[in-house]
Image: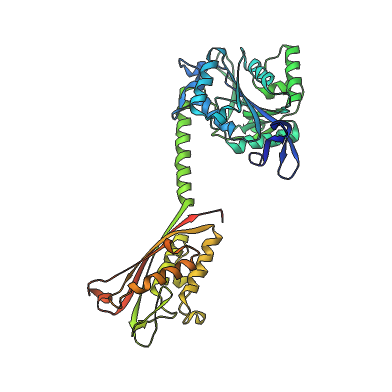
Amino acid sequence: MLGKRFIPFAETEFGLQPTPFLMKMDGSTLPLCGAILAAGGTGSRMAAARPKQLLLLAGEPILVRSCRALLQVSSLAEIVVVAPAAYLEECQSVCRVFLSPQQMARLSFTPGGKTRQDSVRAGLARLSPDISLILVHDAARPLVTLDLVERCLDSAQHHGAAIAALAVTDTLKEVDAATDEIRTTLDRSHLWQAQTPQVVRRDLLKQAFNKALQDDFQGTDEASLLEHAGMTVRVVTGSQKNLKITRPEDLVLAEALLEQDHKDENKQTRHRAMKIGHGFDVHRLVSGRKLILGGVEIDYHLGLAGHSDADVVSHALTDALLGALGLGDIGRHFPDSDPQYKGVNSLLLLEKVWELAKTRGLALANADITIVCQAPKLMPYLAGMQEKLARSCQAGPEQVNIKATTTEQMGYTGRGEGIAAHAVILLEVTHAG
């Protein structure tokens, strides 16, 4: 990918200066890239009072969204916005309202011509002469992704010219314009629908412009100019979401796509940013056993029965952790039928499960534990439990809260028959696991 692995400026004795190439992390280079954002049309098919690029899309002008899409591509050293001469000042003004000064510093504006061809030529003339790889994008395609832009840049770097396009999936008919009668069905197996970005080496684009001027040829896009000049253009698979806003219904569709993307992003963020789990455990109090809670030995004449040390506090926290990870419960991982876990320190089991969380890039945000116990009194031991459990989860003691309560002598815990514990845990993503 190009976006975050290249830098468009080099450090010199005069400060940051444009360079004729971009430096990769591995030391290799990429020609210096610049973009022309074609916003010179008036959008007559939109049937609006103003050019469509100034219409709002989900609260922001279409032009601003298209600028922002290109601004996220760090390998684009310059971006020239070609706007209708009558609306040039307004285009600059709306961009200043919605974009930061740092973003505006990468933009320049120039008036367009009568045709797209004239407008792109005007944009080309505005780019610095050091720019050797030219990206042209329609301002009416504000949903273009960073991935698509970078794939087009990468292909053009290797082959000279490349455009985003989609293979035609609908059946195509050739129709008589005068009678509306079908002449024939076209073979769609080799047909592609052109999109933008369209990326080409500067020298090739200039040659194509000169050839078109010489032949009085008007192309519909940059690829058609290159084709006319006998040059090869590669296709990069585009996206259905990279639609061109041409008619009012396209604006509705673009808003729906943005809304869905926003929902998906929020869902993904929530899924990745936190994991919540709940655990519960209970053991019977019996004679002849030590009472271990949260890794701390409690001075009491009874202990908890179990295959391990029967530490209900550690077990509840371990179960909560497994729940947050979606990995079942403690019995699945440490069955009481396995002799290796007989009498084992339950903190060791907690630490084994915590390693699973670490490998997934998770850290403890906080844990909240409630111990239900009529006797003995646990207040003097809570700080020790807090410290041991936090250490097992590679966290600070302040991230583990422990409370002890009774049931007012009701139920099995109230009658002193057993001790129970509830635990709730919140994990947060620190890096991709």
Q: Quadrant of residue 9?
A: top right
- Residue 430: image x %, image y %? 53, 54
Q: Quadrant of residue 420?
A: bottom left
From this view, report whether residue 219 is shown above or below residue 270: above
Residue at point 56% right, 30% down?
103
From this view, report whether residue 389 is shown above or below residue 375: above
* Residue 238 appears left or right of 329: right
**Which of these two is toward me, 364 or 121?**
364
From this view, report whether residue 220 is shown above or below residue 353: above
Name the quadrant of the C terminus: bottom right
Whether residue 428 is visible to the viewer of this picture, yes or no, is: yes
Q: Residue furthest front?
A: 13
From this view, report whether residue 72 is shown above or below residue 139: below
Q: Quadrant of residue 221?
A: top right
* Residue 333 appears left or right of 82: left
- Residue 110: image x %, image y %? 61, 17
**Which of these two is toward me, 221 or 363?**
363
Residue at point 54% right, 25% down?
140
* Residue 211 appears left or right of 36: right
Whether residue 329 is visible to the viewer of this picture, yes or no, is: no
* Residue 93 appears left or right of 118: left
Name the quadrant of the N terminus: top right
Residue at point 34% right, 83% down?
300
